[in-house]
Image (spheres, rainbow, N blue to C red):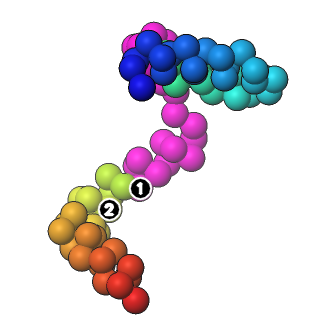
Amino acid sequence: MKTADLKIDLINKITQIKETNVIKEIQRVLDFELNEGIFKLTAPQKKRIMDAKQEVKQKKYITELSANKEISEWLDK
């Protein structure tokens, strides 16, 4: 499907949406993608980022290679 066709399909789907929250969320994503407006984090998101930074400082993480190995082992069970 060409980009123009995808855009038309998306526009048609958006016009059928009745739920205001869904429309607002689409607007938020589009604004972020188009660099319009500021992406605001919620308090839980900010806390998780701070927690993650602490985990990195304390070396409480695994490498991508290790994570992929664990996932593969889990999927093979």
Can you give x and y, in whole percent of width and height, for residue 52 in the image? 36, 55
Which residue is painted at 72% across and 15% down in the image? 15
User: Nearest the camera: 55 or 7?
Assistant: 7
Answer above or below: position of 16 versus 43: above
Say which mark, if any, is on residue 55: 2
Q: Is residue 65 magenta?
A: no
Q: Residue furthest front?
A: 1
Residue 34 appears in view: yes
Q: Amino acid at mark 1?
A: Asp
Which residue in the structure is indicated by mark 1? 51
> In what quadrant of the picture does the N terminus appear?
top left
Answer above or below: position of 29 versus 70: above
Asked whether, in this view, residue 75 is left or right of residue 56, the answer is right
> In what quadrant of the picture does the C terminus appear?
bottom left
User: Nearest the camera: 62 or 55?
Assistant: 62
Q: Which residues are magenta?
A: 32-51
Can you give x and y, in whole percent of width and height, for residue 74 in the image? 38, 82
Q: Residue furthest bottom?
A: 77
User: Nearest the camera: 46 or 27?
Assistant: 27
Q: Is residue 45 magenta?
A: yes
Q: Quadrant of residue 43?
A: top right
Judged from the image, the secondary structure of the residue bearing numbered disc 2 is helix
Asked whether, in this view, residue 31 is left or right of residue 13, the answer is left
Residue 59 appears in view: no
Which residue is painted at 32% across and 62% down in the image? 55
Which residue is painted at 56% across and 47% down in the image? 44
Can you give x and y, in whole percent of width and height, for residue 6 in the image? 48, 21
Q: Amino acid at mark 2?
A: Glu
Answer above or below: position of 32 versus 57: above
Mark 2 → mark 1, Cα distance in angstroms: 6 Å
